Amino acid sequence: MDLYYELCSITGEKNILKDEPMSAHTTFRIGGPADYFAMPSSAEEIRRIVSLCIEQEVPYYIIGNGSNLLVGDKGFRGVIIQIFKNMRDIRTEGETVTAQAGALLSKVAAAAYDAGLTGFEFASGIPGTLGGAVRMNAGAYGGEMSQVLKSADVLTAEGEVLTIPVEEMKMGYRTSIVSRMDYVVLGAQLVLSRGSKEDIRAKMDELKEKRVSKQPLEFGSAGSTFKRPEGYFAGKLIEDAGLRGFRIGNAQVSEKHCGFVINRGGATAAEVAELMDHIIRRVEETSGVRLQPEVKKIGEF
């Protein structure tokens, strides 16, 4: 049977798009068409889609909100599986928040606030989903997922669903057992603390103000473009290399925060990739530090 119809039989025709521009699904607002774009609504649908791709030797890639992602201008040959709006349920019980992988971090933070739970304020402005945050142990302003995670539900390459306690997640700086084993996050349980809603709101507002004042939120970007080198700050190294505002085409090092490569409007993936390579070379020349990209590159450039 044709791959398109098999995908439709798994998750419904409305949840399978053909030749879907990835610029509509990445925070960079860049990316050519994916052959197929699947939006499953359950762990079983994800398992069946992944199994189908493996069986038919079709490349696939899992995304959430498309942050931390650069898709090539020629698109992606295969199936993009988006765990997002069809898997975003959140519930609170006591001091525990349970959410599906497609829930936005901002929505999880809002649910925690509504329940009077503190500890997740750091994630309220991160433009990603819970699944991606667990996978990479996302963090900001002194907080990170490992501090609040109780356990994660994942799908293995063999199609087995596991619940992994945080003690076994091997979480480090922007990494976890999920990324090392290439598991698919299905959902997670967070443990927070009781707090004053007034204090929680004040903290969230304070962090929002920091983001707005220091980050180029008015432009498309993938957030921090490079990982933080041990003992350094990527943005400072880039600035010291004389690259503040440096651009290739419509891709630019942000003048507001040198740790961000931005799409000034109409930038191509090739321009962003070329700029990232230039930054890596220049920083290594001036400081001896080789930056490692935090942004994942997929597809055909």
Image (spheres, rainbow, N blue to C red):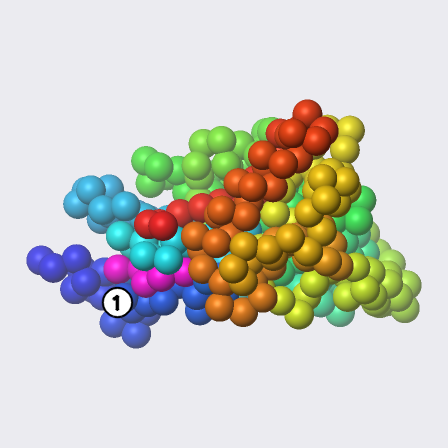
Q: Quadrant of residue 91?
A: bottom right
Q: Name the residue under label 1.
A: 18
Out of 62 and 276, give the one closest to the viewer: 276
Please say whether residue 176 is visible from this viewpoint: yes
Name the residue furthest top: 288
**Where is residue 194 drawn, in percent x and y?**
84, 56
Q: What residue type is labelled 1?
A: Lys
Q: Is residue 151 left or right of residue 71?
A: right
Left or right position of 59 against 190: left
Q: Residue at x 64, y 53 (%)?
A: 246
Residue 44 showing in the rendered view: no
**Picture coordinates of residue 134, whole percent (x, y):** 59, 45
In the image, residue 281 lies in the stretch drawn in magenta: no
Image point (65%, 46%), residue name: 138
In x, y percent, where is residue 144?
A: 72, 44
Name above or below for residue 170 compared with residue 8: above
Q: Where is residue 285 in the image (x, y as percent from the top left)?
A: 65, 29
The furthest residue to the left: 1
Where does the magenta region start and end?
31-35
Q: In which quarter of the image is residue 42?
A: bottom left
Foreground pick, 234 / 20: 234
